[in-house]
Amino acid sequence: MLLSTVLCANITQESPGSPTHKIGECFDIKIEQHRQLIAAPDNFNPEPESPTPSSTPARVIPAVTPAIPTAKPTLPAPAIITPPRFTEKTDRIAAQTAWKYFERNWNSQTGLVNSGDNYHWTTWWDQGSALLGIHAARQLGLLPKDVFEQRMQALLNTLEKLPLPETGLPNKAYSTNTAEMRQLNNKPDPKGISGWSALDMGRFLLGLHIMRSHYPEYSDRINRIVSRWHLTKLVKNGWLNGAITGTNGKIHEVQEGRLGYEQYAALSLKLWNIQAANALYNPPVHTVQVDGIALKVDRRNLQNSHATNYLTNDPYLLWGLELGWTNDIKPQVQNLFQVQAQRFQRTGIITAVNEDSLDRPPYFLYYSVYSNDRAWQAVNSRGEAYPQLRFVSTKAAFSWFALMPNEPYTKKLRDFVQNLSEQSRGFFSGKYENPQLGVNTSVDLNTNAIVLESLLYQAQGQQPIALGGNKSFTKY
């Protein structure tokens, strides 16, 4: 997934040497050049050959025995579908705050939403988040029907005319105010040589599927749009298949995805009858111990594949909120939650790892329970470590509480991030673990979209978003 957020000119509006400002402060400083950050994980194998299925396990994640230091978290049971409703005033306020981001960053010319506050650039992972956030706002009564229809009309008009590279798949990045193809550094890419991301497309196609299933009046149009795209290229020999720009400027196809992200994207593609069986059932995994708790991690790490095997919250939380956890994945989820709760119990440090944008260099980090053979790593896309910038993720905290509301630690997480926001802009990405650094004042699309998703999941009785009914309410 090539999410991305740009934090200097658009979010904190400060130069690299500027002091960090407090919550609520926003300076009108003009910056000559936006800073582009590749969020991903940029999980790909730079070799053209796909992994050999015979050398990998037979299932996605074999069952593991949960650790016993504390009580095992209780995973949500399937719920009966009911019209969504807020149960707490704080939820309503949180939803209204997150929706402010969309109101500020929706582009009427294209229907696209900026990846970062006032930054007119996007990837398809981000636009998948945008669709899910807009759907949540409509279902929760934040978005009137006529405005929703206006936004969908603008987006679908853009997608129908979207410029495509010779590959026949959407380029990795686009301008949100012109819909022109862009490079990952936001420079023009008129020939579309940036390639494509199977992970990004998986999330965007999940968003489109939710729109066509919940709002059938758009179904035929969405199907026609998607039929233009050569989706078969997203899978090769059963593995997710992406493409990058090679050293000669030509597009080079690569295996994409690591454990967690890989299965989430493969399940999303399955909604469009695109089968990536090896990605789903044969990832090369092994078990590691982190603070005495067993976790499955991808064998493909930075050293042997030139891509980091981030074990972080994002794919598992999105999987739960949107699709519902399968029985095979539940032991991994339980232990992933438990190891973070246990770290808090051991150290007193609120822990909710994730990939997130930052308000200071390097502007984007992947904070993982485990990556590249080490625990509790905060690294950039090149694997460089920034332990001093470990952070608590707002979107992870909201999601854990939505998925496991009966766990005392998830309530603590939600309370910790509840007020990390600016009313006119939306939620901040989180807070640094180092108390001297304070709030991470980055404001981005993915954080605010996932806050809305988590609130919808709660409001419709813990029903996965892709499975929920198409009833909405328009009054609180």
Image (spheres, rainbow, N blue to C red):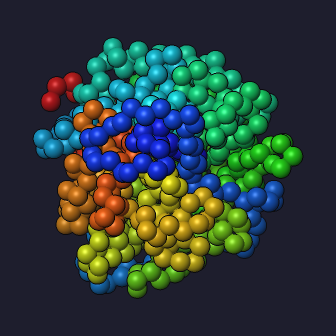
Is residue 469 in view?
Answer: no
Residue sitting nearer the eye, 329 or 41: 41
Can you give x and y, in whole percent of width and height, for residue 316 in the image? 44, 58
Which residue shows up at 40% across the image and 85% down it? Answer: 292
Residue sitting nearer the eye, 379 or 400: 379
Instruction: Give residue 93's quadrant in the image.
Output: top left
Q: Tell me: residue 96, above or below residue 447.
A: above
Q: Tell me: residue 284, above or below residue 397.
A: below
Label count reads 0
Q: Tell me: residue 458, above or below residue 310.
A: above
Residue sitting nearer the eye, 28 or 321: 28
Can you give x and y, in whole percent of width and height, for residue 365 in the image? 50, 58
Can you give x and y, in whole percent of width and height, for residue 287 in the image? 53, 79
Is residue 352 in view?
Answer: yes
Which residue shows up at 78% across the image and 49% down it? Answer: 253
Residue sitting nearer the eye, 146 or 114: 114
Can you give x and y, in whole percent of width and height, for residue 362 in the image? 53, 55
285 horizontally vs 237: left or right: left
Which residue shows up at 21% across the image and 48% down it? Answer: 419
The quadrant in which the C terminus is found is: top left
Which residue shows up at 68% across the image and 57% down it? Answer: 44
